[in-house]
Image (tube, rainbow, N blue to C red):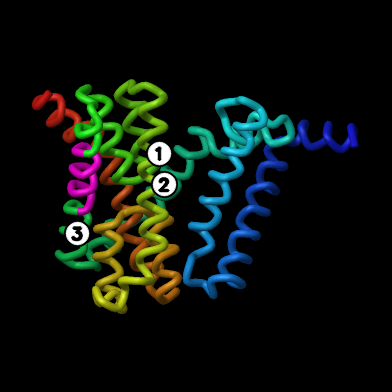
Amino acid sequence: MELFKEVLIQNSLITAFVFVGLIVYIAYLISEKLTRGKFHGSALAIILGLICAYIAGVFTNGEKGVSDIAILSGVGLLGGSMLRDFAIVATAYGAKFSDLKASGAAGIFSLFFGVTLSFIFGALVAILFGYDDPRSITTIGAGTVTFVVGPITGSALGADSEIIALSIAAGLVKSILVMTVTPLVAKSIGLNNPKSAMVFGGLMGTNSGVAAGLAAVDPKLVPYGAMTATFYTAVGCLFVPSIFFFLVDTIY
């Protein structure tokens, strides 16, 4: 067992991939068997990941979730800023402006309106909870855009790590809500065709949430929603740390 443990620690990144793969497999199994796909596997995977992080924190008294456990230390690298930024760049290279134009004026408008509305909501919540520092307000507001825009904005503005963590938490809550609520409201909002899926992706923005929610409604709609959601993240990363921060800084 000691030899096996040593191998897992020495190959920590591979161990992390296996661990995350098992979590995702269990989540999708639960989704299929217990909820018949109504509660999407991606949402369950995030919830299971948060539960694992909490349990690890309780038993190790650490601050880095499961990565405080020696054999799972690779999760810290797998979920770290380096691979996160790599994923963002890879996503940006895969997006084409010609594809965005295909969604029409409604899709483009929903994209900018969605980013702005999400930011305003998050910033107001931050203010209501007593934050009056422009960096903190902007970072938390960025988190409600997506949990990717939050840490990028916080890092760019030099926000405290606690504020960046709050922004990620806000983005995760939004992602889970979009995943779970989308199948319930799809019929009432007419989410049943490619154009409405593009507008929906532009309004909600969270790539994982939109993709998982649309997959539960109709898998054929996923590429259309994911297309505008991809640009949503890019627009958020571009505008929030710059224009939106300057606006908040002017007010405060």
User: Along the horizontal axis of the image, is 13 left or right of 6?
Assistant: left
Q: Secondary structure at mark 2?
A: helix
**Residue at the image position 55 percent from the left and 26 percent from the top:** 63
Alpha carbon distance from label 3 to label 1: 23 Å
**Residue at the image position 18 percent from the left and 49 percent from the top:** 117
Instruction: Determine which residue is flagged by label 3.
Output: 110
Marks 2/1 in contact by CB < 8 Å: the verdict is yes
Mark 3 or mark 2: name the one nearer the start of the chain.
3
In the image, the segment drawn in magenta is 114-124
Alpha carbon distance from label 2 to label 1: 6 Å
**Residue at the image position 18 percent from the left and 46 percent from the top:** 116
User: Along the horizontal axis of the image, is 45 left or right of 18?
Assistant: left
Question: Which residue appears farthest toward the left when viewing the image?
Answer: 251
Alpha carbon distance from label 3 to label 2: 21 Å
Single out the mark in the foreground, 3 or 2: 2
Q: Secondary structure at mark 1?
A: helix
Instruction: Determine which residue is flagged by label 2.
Output: 172
Res. 26 image quadrant:
bottom right
Res. 145 image quadrant:
top left
User: Along the horizontal axis of the image, is 87 left or right of 135?
Assistant: right
Q: Mark 3 belongs to which amino acid?
A: Ser
Instruction: Determine which residue is flagged by label 1.
Output: 168
* Magenta span includes 40: no
Residue 14, placed above or below residue 249: below
For disc 1, the neighbor class at 10 Å (few under 14, some 14 to 19, many from 20) is: many
- Closer to the camera, 59 or 208? 59
